[in-house]
Amino acid sequence: MEEIPAEKKPVILTLPLLKDGCVDTEVDVEEALRRLRLGT
């Protein structure tokens, strides 16, 4: 099997969805999208 070049591999990011130690059901979609665009 041929290795896929790094620039063609998908980027996997973890976005924090915790607020005060609990899963936050009110996700700031704009902030999540901003972080995805920045790759952070």
Image (cartoon, grey):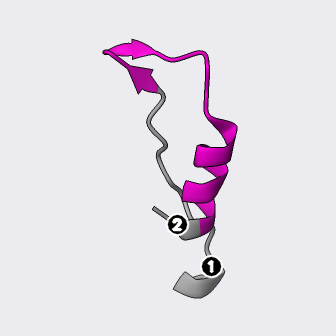
State the image coordinates of residue 29 (x, y, percent, origin top left).
68, 38
Residue 19 lies left or right of residue 25; in this view the side is left
Q: Is residue 26 above or below residue 13?
A: above
Mark 2 burial class by Cα count in 10 Å: few <14, some 14-19, many 20+ = few
Q: Is residue 34 magenta?
A: yes
Q: Is residue 36 magenta?
A: yes
- Quadrant of the image occupied by residue 30: top right
Q: Is residue 17 above or below residue 21?
A: below
Calculate the distance from the C-alpha at mark 1 to the C-alpha at mark 2: 28 Å
In the rendered image, which quarter contains the N terminus?
bottom right
Q: Which residues are magenta?
A: 18-37
What residue sits 48% from the left and 28% below the top? Answer: 17
Q: Nearer the viewer, mark 1 or mark 2?
A: 2
Residue 12 shows up from this direction: yes
State the image coordinates of residue 14 (x, y, percent, origin top left).
47, 46
**Closer to us: 10 or 32:** 32
Q: From the image, tell me which residue sits under label 1.
A: 1
Q: Is residue 22 above or below residue 4?
A: above
Q: From the image, tell me which residue sits under label 2.
A: 39
In the rendered image, which quarter contains the C terminus?
bottom left
**Closer to us: 7 or 25:** 25
The kind of residue on which mark 2 rests is Gly
Element class at badge 2: loop
Element class at badge 1: loop
Residue 12 lies left or right of residue 22; in this view the side is right
State the image coordinates of residue 4 (x, y, percent, origin top left).
61, 82
What residue sits 63% from the left and 65% below the top? Answer: 37
What residue sits 39% from the left and 12% below the top? Answer: 22
**Closer to us: 36 or 11:** 36
- Quadrant of the image occupied by residue 26: top right
Numbered-mark total: 2
